[in-house]
Amino acid sequence: QVQLVESGGGSVQTGESLTLSCAASGDTDRSYCMAWFRQTTEKPRAGVAGVYWPTHLTYYSGSVKGRFTVSHDRATNTLLLEMRDLKSEDTAIYYCAATNYGCYDWDADSEYIYWGQGTQVTVSS
């Protein structure tokens, strides 16, 4: 089992930055693929960014590429999401997810076994 706890959400203005953290604990040795998803009341849960941490291979959705950076710190088992130039459409609940082995379909939520409780990000103008 892997436990995921997100932190770092909050309210910011458009154009500002925010960094989300996801602390992983438990049996993390095989949880090679980790990702951030987001969800609103109007839109279903969608992949934002992912990482296959053994090789640091990263994945991004088109809407955040160039603005968000995902990274993984193996020493602390922490997944980070650095978000820059935030827009109102980035407002959502952000979830951390993990699965064992590879990122075969990184932005498919059905691929992930473990989920955090979510953290709210609100971007206002």
Image (spheres, helix red, strand yellow):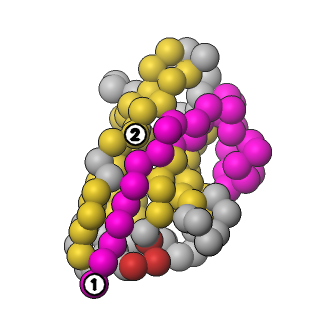
- Residue type, mark 1 in image: Ser
Near mark 2 (Cα within 10 A), the count class, few <14, some 14-19 or many ≥20, is many
Residue labelled with disc 1: 125
Q: Residue at x 47, y 56 (%)?
A: 93
Asked if 5 appears above or below 92 in the picture, the reply is above
Callout 1: helix, strand or loop?
loop
Asked if 4 appears above or below 104 in the picture, the reply is above
* Residue 81 appears in view: no
Q: Residue at x 48, y 30 (%)?
A: 4
Q: Nearer the viewer, residue 122 or 97?
A: 122
Residue 6: mark: 2
Q: Magenta region: which residues?
A: 96-125
Horizontal relation, residue 121 to residue 65: left or right: left
Q: Is residue 15 magenta?
A: no
Quadrant holding the C terminus: bottom left
Asked whether disc 1 touches disc 2, contact meaning CB atoms under 8 Å apart, the reply is no
